[in-house]
Amino acid sequence: MREKITSGQNKRVKQWRALTSKKGRKATQSYLLEGWHLVQEALKAQVPLTAIIGTAEQLAAHAATFPADVDVFELTDSIAKTLGDTSTPQGIFATAPMPDDTGVDPTTATGSWLFLDQVQDPGNIGTMVRTADAAGLTGVVLGQGSASRFLPKVLRSMQGSQFHIQLVEGDLHDWITAFTQRQLPVYGTNLDPQAKDYRDVAAMKAGAIVMGNEGNGMAPDLQQLTTQNLYIPIKGQAESLNVAVAAGIVMFRLVG
């Protein structure tokens, strides 16, 4: 189906605008992708899009790639601008159902994972998800207190990597315990008296790396659950490393 919408008060338009809020996403169990790159990556990954939305120009430019069973909605330029979260919206969007995490069980999960404990900056989360993708990790778990994976800024920052690896929300206590009970190593990243230089740890085929909050690091109770906590030596006078930079260093070193 293809429909042209010319009123900003249209019911569908209001629903799409609401997807920028947690309440709106929860009500419809869906979220909004903005920009052709994200829409294209979703299509490549065969994400079951529920609608493709855009200006006449953008729809015409990409129509050949649209699945026949996805509804397409044409908007005026002025309405399209009200959906965008950026200062210069590209004029093309898609809606997708929020994924069901219940199928991802920490007691049976395999491969290498990144656990994020209360990481709140959207840019940091996006960068770490992309880096996990680049480093060959299986997935990323966003622990309680971390920014939502459906925030527009997080979605943009991930640049489609969320479709290449598993990305779920979960209780890190459960995930860490499930891994260590199966003798899979879980490495925290925190400076404590027992922490090891990350270069002194062998690469792993399966296990997890935990990155903590930007200001406070890992929660103390999680630190007690890990196999080993690691640190990155700083040679200069910088007080610390950005969490996403640190995550990249450790991931590329430890993931075999």
Image (tube, rainbow, N blue to C red):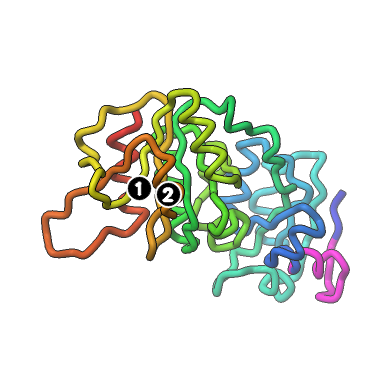
Please state the total of marks drawn on the protein image: 2
Which quadrant is the C terminus positioned in? top left
- Bounds of the magenta span? 4-17
Residue, disc 1 = 247
Label 2 residue SS: helix
Q: Which residue is drawn at 23% across and 40% down?
A: 196
Q: Mark 2 is on which residue type? A: Met
> Could you tell me residue 213's position as x and y percent?
42, 59
Mark 2 vs mark 1: which is more N-terminal?
2
Label 1's element?
helix
Crowd around label 2: few <14 · some 14–19 · many ≥20 (10 Å): many
Q: Which residue appears at 26% of the width and 27% of the height?
A: 202
Q: Which residue is drawn at 70% across and 54% down?
A: 94
Q: Which mark is residue 113?
A: none
Determine which quarter of the picture holds residue 68: top right
Circles 2 and 1, Cβ within 8 Å, touching? The answer is: yes
